[in-house]
């Protein structure tokens, strides 16, 4: 009967096959989903869907039952953190570029930066742009922080939820804050391995400076995950964790973990010191407590006693020696440590990660409240981030908790934080999306995530905290399924993998940055860096440079006129040296009369006054329209007094080339008789004018000399006072002469008030082909500055002086970054800085002048502080040190020559249209 | 791969088809089963298969050795090698950290250093079942209860056969390996009943066990302080039913699946909650394990054919080790010892008063009281079994006996499933058989429709998420 037998076992097989066929058929039929045994089959081609069903089931099985890990001791009611995986850094391939064209440069974060990428370094910016590409691919979103409100007033919110944090960050830039800005980030397994937070920390510290590593656990609180936020502990430490099944009541610190030593003998823990200068040890002072020996590179620094009655949390701060590498804590007796904070003492950001796998808001409520409060206060955070919700959603999905309970716990935790550190801002995260696998093998969003997010948002609002909807940023409900398929989520369907965590950190950081930018008071507009308007404005200048470079006979006279930046000579000396080296030296140029000054020494120039001299300047003028030297200075000598200006002092006497030594003085009614000596030899007296001067008039006398090293001496032989404006030495050879005439404290208005004829006469003599104007810094300090007047007056001055100089080209240098101290001692922008920054480029453009912003070259907003820190900025927030001026001159020269190189590569006609 | 996954349905259909297509050829047929079994296990992770292969190879060589040896000493030595190596695998991968922790706790205070870092070895799925089945085969070979010497391939397939590999039942050689030579047959009745058992198992697991687990047991055991005493009590009862409906469901599916390949596995459960004493209970609960402990542990220790104190000791040892078999935690041993202690009390009582008659009016009363007492003991001791540690079990007991009332957290669905569980437990077996008969007599297309409807019903009635079988961890 084999046939009959076969038909019988075939019937079971047929039943199986028919059952499958029917299940597949019904799933594909146009029926309501409730009647489809395998709903996912209708979501695409049958073959791939069936394959996916089989493979995903396999993955699910592997995920759930790969083995039963030995009991870790903590509560198993919530998902545990998966073992850390080695994930190679993904380097996105650059998109193929068109043949012959260079790939586009990274986006420059500037005023149009709407994402929050500002102030990131090139490497970080490249990573951030890579994250942006990943975000686009995953459909994740930039979700702004809901700022919340800490204090409501009659007219609305008077203090935003994050204001204390942002104020602290601003203080880092303005110098008003000398303490680190600490962030305490309490959370669950998502941050337990410091993923997400590592991105945020790195970027915050890059933007605002680093205060160090911050708080570190003694050991990893759980066996899973990375140990980057913990020391290397010996084996005998015992943990008491708040996430344990039954943590002791009224016992645990704010970190949620206590590490105890004693039961298994002395224990130790090592930390890599890095750049830290202080270590703050958090511990429990308790009856019968032992001691902790603190060693750096094996050398004992301190012994901390932990015996105290009654038990209470305490901390000990230990200074670490310079260059120390390893911090070692050795216990003796019964000791309970909570962690160590390593900080470098610099004002910067410290970002603490306090993440415990399985934690939810209610878990941190199990901490001992007095300990929580005391330690939180000890950390003095500017921001507390509460990042829970994932385990709440998990518990909710299993009906282990209720929405009311979740909300109540969230509210209580927010309240606890606000009460503990009332001066700190707080920020609440929503849970991220997660998925579950149905019996049919489908992946569906875990229920409850959105509800928990809404509950947390309400708790944040009611508690005056900011709120960030990470669920929405991730891409909304269901996004975890996309993340899984793209390898951004672990197979547990809950925890993002390293790359997914980086994306979350990226989104969170940018949300903070955008909120920070929006919260700051209106800032000074960012200026474009580099030389502007070079197309037409510098054609003649560049042509002369080109000729000089080709060795043709030409001379380029540059006259820079301005205030203290010019008067310092450091900037112009650097410019002159660099240009003369490349294009040839046409002499030192004009030197204003005045007192002896060390600032002239580097250029080999000295001034000497003998007898009774009064050095006057245009700032002291009681009446406008007086005649002054180019720099707004004049030296008035009584009878018998003499003035000497030496050029190229210390130079070896060169006999070539022929040169011209010129003297500028004022002649007029009551002027004394003048004797001039060149190189010690008295020059024949100047013939008297045909008619006596009725007003002070500029007179110029030139003496033929050879070589650059000469001195000119002026003696008042009596008959009245003698007013000297300056002297100049010009070599009659091809090259560049760079005059620098500056009056400290002056403004464009100062120069405008000078007798036009006097200026005109001097300029006609100097014949510069390029006039460089550098005013603006002093104008920035005038609270009542009229920007329109500045534009008009400065513009008219430039126009006039160009004509006086015989049609010279012009280049306007804007203001440096000028700061001033506010009432609270912090630095703030000079009152009219924004107006000057806005006015000068416009004015320069209107006058057909090139424009260069030293402020942009310094780094823009509050760059003066960075320059001060680097020894480049003066303590007054206005001036630069000689090194600073040299650095700035380097930038100017670089931009000028870059524009010149562009000019050289384009025909003059095209060059005139460019720029 | 779970029995309750669609992947398993595909897998079963393919394996079934190939197996029966080759049914007349022994080795190809068995090869189908071997490949299927390896594939089935590999869906979790293939690496333990290497372990299983090695352990089986050692056992096989030992069996070959003692079968060929006439020397009692050599035979015993080889048996010892086999047992020690097999138990060594179990102890290493399952109990190493328990022993280490215990040594640390006991020896640490004496100043003796013991490694404190956990070994962290993964426990291969099904290791306990594999070990016990492997031991039973070796001992049966040694005792001569298995006449034939099987090939290594058969030996391995016997241990790896996918229906029982992961969570039992522990199948004796007579039910499996000794049937490998027979050309299999499958009547329409047997095939239908196999499918019926699978369908019943799926419904038991997915509808009743999972709903009870996720709806009440898990949350209450996670945070007993959040629930009233009454709710804790209901959760304890619900856990007993969850465990039964979960584990017996797996056995149902295993038995039904084996039946589809022409193998008849012994029943593993017999309505255990109708037991009137603990001996009766262990005769109804996880019968294959109870029988194994009886045959390979209790009786070799001397059973009850020794002095009375020694018999009681044997009982305690058997129950203690039987408890520890369930997990690497002393609370399982305590659970087993608690049962053993109560069995000792019963045994002593019987020695003193004689075994009570099973007939008569008082017998009914005694049975009733015995049922109440037995069920109560089973439910209460399972709190230790279910809790993650003894401290937590203590909290659960405290909460349970605190006396607070209120059942607001027990949902209607949970009540319904509890009622279904309880009623189905006392429903005469004949009704199940009749339902099976009805299914068997259905035409093939109707059976398919019924199975699909069962699947749809399960899909709608059960909780959203799938849950692994409770006994996978043992």
Image (cartoon, helix red, strand yellow):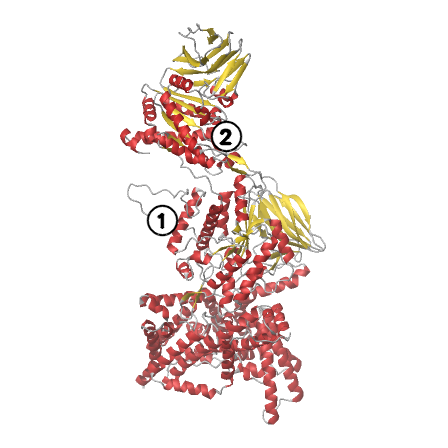
Residue A222 place in picture, x, y as percent = 55, 58
Task: State which tag comes first along the sequence, 1 or 2.
Answer: 1
Q: In the depicted view, which residue is nearer to us: A793 or A487?
A: A793
| Quadrant containing the N terminus of chain B in the rendered view | bottom left
The quadrant in which residue B188 appears is bottom left
The answer, for residue A79, to whether it is visible in the render is: no
User: How far apart in space, not on screen, are marks 1 and 2 (Cα)?
Assistant: 44 Å
Is the residue marked by circle 1 packed among few (<14), some (14-19), or many (20+) residues within 10 Å? Answer: few
A777 is higher (above) or lower (below) than A170:
above
- The chain containing the residue under callout 1 comes to A
Mark 1 or 2: the one toward you: 2
Secondary structure category for the residue under label 1: loop
Residue A266 place in picture, x, y as percent = 66, 53
Q: In the depicted view, which residue is nearer to us: B383 or A778?
A: A778
A582 is higher (above) or lower (below) than B403:
above
Residue A721 place in picture, x, y as percent = 51, 11
Q: Which residue is mark 2?
A: A880
B107 is higher (above) or lower (below) than A676:
below
Residue A829 place in picture, x, y as percent = 50, 37
Q: State how many labels appear.
A: 2
* Mark number displayed over residue B171: none
- The chain containing the residue under callout 2 comes to A
The answer, for residue A502, to whether it is visible in the render is: yes
Are discs 1 and 2 located on one and the same chain?
A: yes
Q: In the depicted view, which residue is nearer to us: A413 or A332?
A: A413
Side (left or right) of A303 relative to A690: right
Tell me whether the residue at label 1 lies in contact with that at label 2, contact meaning CB atoms closer than 8 angstroms.
no
Q: Which residue is mark 1?
A: A93
Secondary structure category for the residue under label 2: loop
């Amino acid at each position: 009967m084999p046939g009959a037998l076969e038909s019988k076992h075939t019937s079971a097989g047929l039943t199986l096959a028919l059952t499958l066929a029917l299940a597949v058929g019904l799933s594909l039929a146009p029926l309501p989903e409730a009647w489809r045994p395998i709903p996912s089959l209708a979501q695409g081609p049958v073959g791939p869907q069936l394959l996916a069903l089989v493979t995903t089931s396999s993955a699910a099985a592997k995920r759930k039952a790969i083995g039963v890990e030995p009991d870790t001791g903590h509560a198993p009611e919530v998902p545990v953190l998966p073992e850390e995986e080695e994930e190679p850094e993904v380097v996105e391939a650059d998109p193929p570029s068109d043949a012959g064209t260079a790939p586009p440069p990274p986006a420059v974060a500037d005023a149009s930066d709407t994402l929050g990428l500002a102030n990131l370094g090139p490497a970080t910016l490249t990573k951030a742009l890579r994250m942006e590409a990943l975000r686009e691919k995953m459909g994740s979103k930039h979700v702004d922080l809901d700022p919340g409100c800490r204090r409501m007033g009659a007219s609305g919110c008077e203090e935003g939820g994050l204001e204390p944090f942002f104020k602290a960050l601003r203080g880092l830039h303005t110098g008003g804050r000398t303490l680190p800005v600490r962030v305490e980030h309490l959370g669950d397994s998502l941050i337990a391995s410091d993923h997400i937070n590592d991105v945020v920390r790195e970027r915050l510290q890059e933007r605002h400076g680093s205060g160090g590593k911050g708080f570190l656990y003694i050991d990893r609180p759980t066996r899973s995950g990375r140990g980057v936020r913990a020391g290397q502990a010996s084996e005998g430490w015992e943990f008491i964790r708040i996430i344990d099944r039954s943590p002791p009541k009224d016992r645990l610190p704010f970190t949620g973990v206590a590490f105890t030593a004693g039961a298994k003998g002395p224990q130790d823990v090592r930390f890599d010191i890095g750049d830290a200068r202080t270590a703050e040890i958090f511990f429990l002072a308790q009856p019968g407590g032992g001691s902790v020996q603190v060693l750096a590179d094996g050398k004992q620094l301190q012994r901390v006693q932990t015996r105290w009655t009654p038990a209470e949390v305490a901390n000990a701060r230990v200074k670490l020696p310079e260059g120390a590498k390893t911090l070692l804590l050795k216990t003796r007796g019964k000791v309970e440590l909570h962690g160590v904070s390593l900080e470098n003492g610099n004002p910067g950001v410290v970002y603490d990660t306090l993440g415990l796998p399985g934690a939810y808001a209610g878990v941190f409520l199990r901490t001992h409240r007095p300990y929580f409060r005391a330690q939180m206060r000890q950390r003095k955070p500017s921001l507390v981030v509460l990042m829970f919700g994932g385990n709440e959603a998990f518990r909710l999905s299993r009906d282990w908790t209720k929405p009311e309970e979740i909300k109540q716990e969230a509210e209580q935790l927010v309240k606890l934080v606000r009460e503990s550190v009332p001066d700190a801002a707080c920020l609440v995260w929503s849970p991220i999306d997660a998925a579950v696998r149905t019996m049919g093998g489908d992946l569906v969003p875990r229920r409850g995530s959105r509800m928990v997010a809404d509950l947390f948002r309400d708790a944040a609002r009611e508690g005056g905290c900011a709120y960030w909807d990470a669920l929405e940023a991730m891409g909304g409900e269901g996004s975890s399924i996309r993340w899984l398929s793209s390898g951004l989520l672990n197979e547990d369907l809950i925890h993002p993998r390293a790359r997914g965590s980086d994306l979350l950190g990226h989104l969170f950081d940018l949300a903070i940055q955008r909120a920070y930018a929006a919260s700051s008071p209106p800032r000074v507009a960012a200026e474009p860096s580099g030389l502007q308007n070079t197309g037409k404005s510098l054609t003649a200048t560049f042509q002369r440079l080109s000729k000089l470079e080709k060795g043709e006979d030409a001379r380029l006279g540059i006259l820079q006129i301005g205030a203290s930046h010019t008067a310092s000579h450091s900037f112009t000396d650097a410019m002159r040296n660099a240009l003369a080296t490349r294009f040839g030296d046409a002499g030192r140029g004009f030197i204003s009369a005045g007192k002896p000054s060390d600032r002239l020494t580097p250029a080999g120039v000295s001034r000497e006054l003998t007898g009774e001299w009064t050095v006057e300047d245009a700032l002291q003028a009681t009446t406008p329209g007086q005649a002054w030297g180019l720099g707004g200075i004049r030296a008035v000598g009584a009878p018998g007094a003499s003035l000497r200006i030496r050029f190229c002092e210390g130079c070896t006497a060169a006999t070539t080339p022929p040169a011209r030594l010129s003297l500028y003085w004022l002649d007029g009614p009551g002027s004394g008789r003048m004797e001039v000596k060149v190189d010690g030899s008295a020059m024949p007296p100047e013939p008297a004018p045909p008619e006596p001067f009725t007003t002070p008039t500029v007179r110029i006398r030139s003496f033929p000399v050879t070589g650059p090293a000469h001195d000119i001496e002026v003696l008042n032989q009596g008959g009245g006072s003698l007013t000297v404006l300056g002297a100049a030495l010009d070599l009659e050879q091809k090259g560049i002469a760079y005059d620098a005439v500056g009056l400290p404290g002056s403004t464009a208005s100062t120069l405008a008030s000078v007798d036009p004829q006097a200026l005109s006469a001097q300029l006609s003599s100097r014949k510069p082909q390029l006039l460089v104007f550098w005013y603006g810094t002093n104008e920035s300090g005038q609270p009542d500055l009229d920007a329109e007047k500045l534009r008009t007056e400065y513009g008219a001055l430039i126009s006039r002086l160009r004509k006086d100089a015989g049609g010279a080209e012009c280049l306007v240098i804007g203001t440096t970054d000028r700061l001033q101290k506010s009432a609270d001692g912090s630095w703030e922008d000079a009152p009219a800085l924004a107006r000057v920054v806005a006015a000068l480029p416009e004015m320069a453009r209107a006058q057909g002048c090139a424009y260069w912003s030293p402020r942009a070259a310094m780094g823009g907003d509050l760059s003066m502080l960075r320059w001060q820190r680097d020894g480049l900025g003066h303590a007054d927030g206005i001036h630069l040190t000689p090194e600073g001026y040299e650095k700035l001159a380097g930038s100017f020269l670089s931009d000028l020559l870059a524009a010149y190189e562009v000019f050289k590569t384009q025909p003059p006609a095209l060059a005139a249209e460019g720029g | 791969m779970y029995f309750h996954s669609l992947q398993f349905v595909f897998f079963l259909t393919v394996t079934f088809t190939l197996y029966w297509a080759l049914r007349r050829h022994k080795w190809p047929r068995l090869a189908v089963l071997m490949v299927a079994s390896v594939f089935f296990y590999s869906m979790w992770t293939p690496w333990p298969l290497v372990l299983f292969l090695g352990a089986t190879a050692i056992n096989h060589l030992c069996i070959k050795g003692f079968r060929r040896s006439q020397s009692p000493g050599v035979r015993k030595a080889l048996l010892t090698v086999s047992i020690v190596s097999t138990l060594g695998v179990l102890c290493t991968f399952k109990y190493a950290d328990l022993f280490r922790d215990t040594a640390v706790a006991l020896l640490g205070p004496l100043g003796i250093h013991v490694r404190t870092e956990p070994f962290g070895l993964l426990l291969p799925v099904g290791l306990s079942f594999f070990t016990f089945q492997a031991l039973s085969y070796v001992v049966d070979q040694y005792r001569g209860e298995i006449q034939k010497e099987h090939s290594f391939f058969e030996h391995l397939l016997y241990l790896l056969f996918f229906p029982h590999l992961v969570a039992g039942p522990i199948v004796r050689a007579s039910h499996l390996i000794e049937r490998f030579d027979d050309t299999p047959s499958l009547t329409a009745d047997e095939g239908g009943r196999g499918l019926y058992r699978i369908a019943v198992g799926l419904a038991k697991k997915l509808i009743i066990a999972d709903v009870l687990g996720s709806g009440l047991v898990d949350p209450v055991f996670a945070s007993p302080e959040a629930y009233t005493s009454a709710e804790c009590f209901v959760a304890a009862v619900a856990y007993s039913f969850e465990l039964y409906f979960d584990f017996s469901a797996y056995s149902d599916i295993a038995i039904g699946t084996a039946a589809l390949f022409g193998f008849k596995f012994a029943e593993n459960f017999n309505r255990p909650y109708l037991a009137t004493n603990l001996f009766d209970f262990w005769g109804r609960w996880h019968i294959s394990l109870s029988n194994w402990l009886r045959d390979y542990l209790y009786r070799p220790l001397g059973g009850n054919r020794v002095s009375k104190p020694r018999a009681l000791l044997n009982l305690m040892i058997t129950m203690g080790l039987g408890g520890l078999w369930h997990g690497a935690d002393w609370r399982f041993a305590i659970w087993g010892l608690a049962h053993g202690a109560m069995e000792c009390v019963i045994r002593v009582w019987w020695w003193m008063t004689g075994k009570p008659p099973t007939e008569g009016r008082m017998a009914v009363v005694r049975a009733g009281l015995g049922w109440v007492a037995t069920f109560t003991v089973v439910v209460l001791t399972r709190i230790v079994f279910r809790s993650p540690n003894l401290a937590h079990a203590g909290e659960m007991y405290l909460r349970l006996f605190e006396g607070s009332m209120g059942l607001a957290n027990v949902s209607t669905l949970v009540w319904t499933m509890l009622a279904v569980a309880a009623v189905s437990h006392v429903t005469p077996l004949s009704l199940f058989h009749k339902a099976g008969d009805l299914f068997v007599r259905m035409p093939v297309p109707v059976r398919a429709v019924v199975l699909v409807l069962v699947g749809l019903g399960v899909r709608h009635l059960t909780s959203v998420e799938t849950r692994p079988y409770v006994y996978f961890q043992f």
